[in-house]
């Protein structure tokens, strides 16, 4: 009711004016934006997490293959060293035979000794080469396992971030939303370390 410059508001008029002036700031609208933002970020985090999980599985498989390759090469190297030992035994027997043989047969045994020495050197070179390849495969396997652990850490941190997102949605706590962003950032950083082999 108004009269001579005096205006009295009805109780609901003040609330209506406030609602119109602050329509974009209404708590329900703020929560809607929060829900949309968290939903979108969670989808991105889940996608990145899936990629990290795939990379973790791939590096673990590679590490296993390299470890298997190292084991095969160690067996090959062992076979070569056994072959080397067999040639050494034959060479020793030829040396004994040469020393006990009559003079006209000593040249025959000396030729065998020389042949065994040459063969032993070739076998030794091959065994050392195979051993080096086995050590390299072991080293590469360790590198792949380290990278696998980084990918797994990154995936786990991103999963924690998704859990924080769910809690933030349920509680409508802004600080949990920020915690989700922070933890997601840490997960992406750990993923970057994995990508850089650090």
Image (spheres, helix red, strand yellow):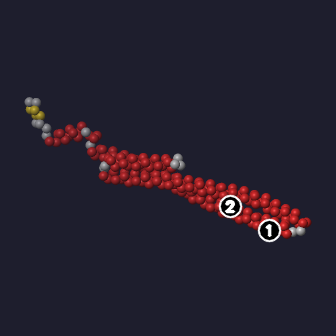
Q: Which residue is mark 2?
A: 77
Q: Residues within 10 Å of mark 2 (few under 14, many from 20)?
A: many
Residue 38 image point, x, y percent: 37, 48
- Label annotation for residue 50: none
* Element assignment for label 2: helix
Q: CA distance from mark 1 to mark 2?
A: 24 Å
Residue 184 image point, x, y percent: 41, 48
Q: Residues within 10 Å of mark 1 (few under 14, many from 20)?
A: some
Q: Nearer the viewer, residue 179 or 138?
A: 138
Residue drawn at (20%, 38%), measured in percent from left and top? 17
Q: Which residue is mark 1?
A: 93
In the picture, the quarter occupied by the N terminus is top left
Q: Is residue 26 above or below residue 6?
A: below
Q: Nearer the viewer, residue 104 or 182?
A: 104
Residue 41 image point, x, y percent: 40, 47
Can residue 39 be seen in this snapshot?
Answer: no
Residue drawn at (75%, 58%), measured in percent from left and top? 121
Residue drawn at (30%, 52%), measured in percent from left and top? 171
């Amino acid at each position: 009711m108004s009269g001579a410059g005096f205006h009295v508001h009805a109780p609901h008029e003040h609330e209506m004016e406030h609602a119109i002036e602050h329509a974009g700031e209404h708590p329900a609208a703020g929560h809607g934006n929060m829900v949309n933002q968290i939903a979108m970020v969670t989808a991105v985090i889940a996608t990145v997490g899936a990629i990290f999980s795939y990379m973790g599985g791939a590096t673990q498989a590679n590490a296993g293959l390299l470890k298997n390759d190292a084991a095969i090469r160690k067996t090959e190297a062992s076979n070569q060293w056994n072959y080397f030992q067999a040639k050494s035994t034959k060479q020793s027997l030829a040396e004994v035979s040469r020393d006990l043989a009559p003079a006209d047969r000593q040249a025959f045994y000396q030729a065998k000794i020389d042949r065994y020495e040459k063969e032993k050197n070739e076998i030794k070179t091959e065994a050392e080469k195979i051993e080096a390849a086995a050590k390299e495969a072991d080293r590469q396997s360790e590198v792949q396992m380290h990278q696998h652990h980084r990918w797994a850490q990154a995936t786990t941190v991103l999963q924690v971030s998704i859990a924080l997102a769910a809690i933030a949605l349920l509680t409508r706590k802004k600080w949990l939303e920020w915690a989700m962003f922070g933890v997601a950032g840490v997960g992406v950083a750990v993923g970057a370390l994995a990508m850089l082999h650090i």
